[in-house]
Amino acid sequence: MAKRVYFFDDPEPVGRELLGGKGAGLAEMTRIGLPVPYGFTITTEVCREYYALGGKMPDGLKEETVQAMRKVEEKTGKKFGDPTNPLLVSVRSGARVSMPGMMDTILNLGLNDETVKGLARLTSNERFAWDSYRRFVMMFSDVVLGIPKDEFEKILDEVKEHEGVKFDAEVSAEGLKQVAERSKLLVEKELGRPFPQDVWEQLFMAIEAVFRSWNNPRAILYRQLNGIPDDWGTAVNIVEMVFGNMGDDSGTGVAFTRNPATGEKELYGEYLANAQGEDVVAGVRTPKPIKEMQNEWPQTYQQLLQVAELLEKHFKDMQDMEFTVERGKLYMLQTRSGKRTAEAAVRIASEMAQEGLISKEDAVLRITPEEINRLLHKRIDHKAKGNPVAVGLAASPGAAVGEVVFSADEAVAEANAGKKVILVRPETTPDDLHGMVAAQGILTTRGGMTSHAAVIARGMGKPAVTGTESLRLDLDNGIIYAPNGVVIKRGDVITLDGGTGEVFLGALPLVEPEMSKYSEQILAWADEFRRLGVKANADTPEDAALARSFGAEGIGLTRTEHMFLGPERVQVVQDMIMAETSEERIKPLERLLELQKGDFVGILKAMDGLPVTIRLLDPPLHEFLPEPGEIEEQIEEAMKRGASEKEIEKLNKLFRRAVQLQEHNPMMGFRGCRLGIVYPEIYEMQVRAVAEAAVELKKQGYNPRFQIMHPLVGTESEMKFLADMTHKVVKEIFEKAGVELDYKVGTMIEVPRAALVAGDLAKYAEFFSFGTNDLTQMTYAYSRDDAEGKFLGHYVEKGILPENPFITLDTQGVGRLISMAVTEGRQTRPDIEIGICGEHGGDPRSIEFCHRAGLDYVSASPYRVPVARLAAAHAAIKEKRGEVFRDK
């Protein structure tokens, strides 16, 4: 049978997997000679055993616990349950990773009607003894017996009012005795049985309560939010009590070895004299800043400074410490790696590396990609965060404050009037784009992490919260109905946190984003270690310049269809679509040529000297036309107002064309390279625009580098046709201008067949770029928006899928196709350039796979470029250290 109990002074270190973070910290502090109360840990394995037995204590555990308590008695010289010299203990939870406040603790266990008297005699402090007892009755009743602590607080408040005092510490010994006695009566009234007096019964009930707390609602939610496995379980730490409530020379506090908000190297925290641990967090009394301790207890303060320095050097990280001072003697009750803001994290990692405490590699690994991401966007001031009225999906990071509007047109109108607005929609469509541009942030009640709202918001760097299903919209009356009876009306101000998915009523203060010298240093070190290149997806010169400022080494995807948006351009595109012959298409194509050329000049200039991959037109043509039903309404309205026959015929013609282009499954329909093969003049126009833009810039002294990417290719003959056409047009333009430029022709691999015949495609393709959004859709046969809206959440919740494959790449299915394509493509063309340009290009775990699969680069939205740089470095460092990559 595996060992169930470990003492803090056991000679061999065991680790947090068995001891939990708290137990491992107490054992390690004991090992390095710090003052730690004596005790032992019941392992996380026992917690798992408890749940495997259906919530029953394993056989033999009680006997092992009794034996362990005998050793604590021997070490402390006290006896558990002895009225003359009672041993009191705390019973504390401890998961392997910090879950602050999520599980339960009981202090002063071992007190009963007899031992409280012995404690009073032993310490000559009756007030302290009864204060400890009333605290124990309240905590035990709340945590173990399920009676809310508010009921006991009422009793204490009544006694304070009777004695005419304000603070707990001012209540007399007799008053505290009354609180304890009345609290016990409350327990008997609520449960029909007396408060337990047998100290062993108290102990076993408390151990079981801590095990149960692993699955309390707040712990379950915390694990879900932080990706902590449900089967880890919690350890139970049983520790000799030391008392901070023995008088003015006693106290308790929490301290950090560095400032957790800013990262500054200073002892940071707070403490309370004549108090126990829960007083610091309960808010009943205002704690004092830790620096005031040097005036009140100068020797203790100096000792705490020394302990902080020792712990930081030992654990090589900023520490969060809990301590108690009992009659002037310092005891350490806990140490763990401290939670910190993203701002503090980058400063601490950077400075610790410069101090020689950790290596540059460790400093890079200390920073999570999402911490870098948070620094690139406005965020809610951590001092001001309140309670959210709703929580959705954290679809696009950053924070935004604005007045609620319910339509894109309204967003534009209000923004033009100088107001800041939040666009609230059930879900967004391409028709809402102008409103999304105008809004500070986007809130939807439907849609997932890869919905239209999420993808577009991330590309624009705007905060977005999607899938907020707890909100009910009344669009006709401009009202949002939130949980708990909260009603939000048009024009009311709300705050979104796109990094957490939270929605707040009112305006919370925001902190402006900044890339400090510390974050720049971390990213510079990351660039030293990574192998993968990092490019950006950008459709405008502004996005390209932004991406370059964030460290992008090129543009991996420019979507030319986005350049067709806008009233003036859409009309030209519609004229092209309505043309019935190649000759009729020439005029609108010539107009589009000039528009596209200007677009390409801007992007190539912004990325001067760096490669720009331009994807030719991809979506089906019907997306550029109104819906047939909308056109029918226009026809009806035109007839009512007596419009001319010419106008009505034009609308009828538009209607017939829209119906003709409608498809049952447009994702697999007449789109991508199929358009360019059936209507080659469209792709020829686009290639001509790119080449002419490059020639113009070359003559101006720039160094344009372009790559033409053909979408949706699935056969060798398609690739040959498109490559031949591209080379023919480019050669013609270069010869006419007398210019020579390097360029490449390649394809986006998004059709599963393309991955399977990649070796054949590589005869004509000089690069591959995996479009993993569509490749995932077609591999799974999922329509992304439908799947996320209807069943993907249930699949993940039930364990059918480990996670949403549109957020993190499916390495076993889609990943296998990618690996096959990489291998076969390089067999045909060893120098072929291979990258990824789907949404997965900005996902850290997907980037890890791309590194392992041997890709040359990843391409992400501009705001994800620093994230990708860091994630690529993490993958390289882990590989170098031989760490196992985890497939999903």
Image: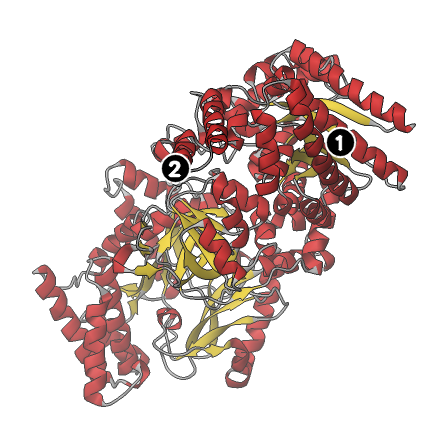
Which residue is disc 1 drawn over?
Answer: 690
| Circle nearer the viewer, 1 or 2 | 1
Q: Does residue 795 appear anywhere in the picture?
A: yes
Q: Residue at x 35, y 71 (%)?
A: 282
Colouring chosen for the image of the structure: secondary structure
Q: Residue at x 60, y 32 (%)?
A: 573
Is residue 403 toward the left or the right of residue 878 in the image? left
Quadrant of the image containing the N terminus:
top left
Task: Please provide percent x and percent y for residue 314.
Answer: 61, 57
For numbered disc 2, what is the local secondary structure?
loop
Q: Quadrant of residue 630?
A: top left
- In primary-sequence order, the first of circles 1 and 2 is 2
Label disc, if present, on residue 2 of the rendered structure: 2
Q: Residue at x 41, y 79 (%)?
A: 286
Q: Residue at x 51, y 65 (%)?
A: 381
Task: Please provide percent x and percent y for residue 641.
Answer: 40, 41
Q: Residue furthest bottom?
A: 164
With respect to residue 674, does 29 lie above or below? below
Is residue 548 toward the left or the right of residue 463 in the image? right
With respect to residue 789, does 330 lie above or below? below
With respect to residue 251, does 528 lie above or below? above
Which amino acid lies under the numbered mark 2 shown in the image of this protein? Ala
| Foreground residue among 190 and 555 | 555
For numbered disc 1, what is the local secondary structure?
helix
| Foreground residue among 400 and 500 | 400
Task: Please provide percent x and percent y for residue 440.
Answer: 52, 56
Q: CA distance from mark 1 to mark 2?
A: 69 Å
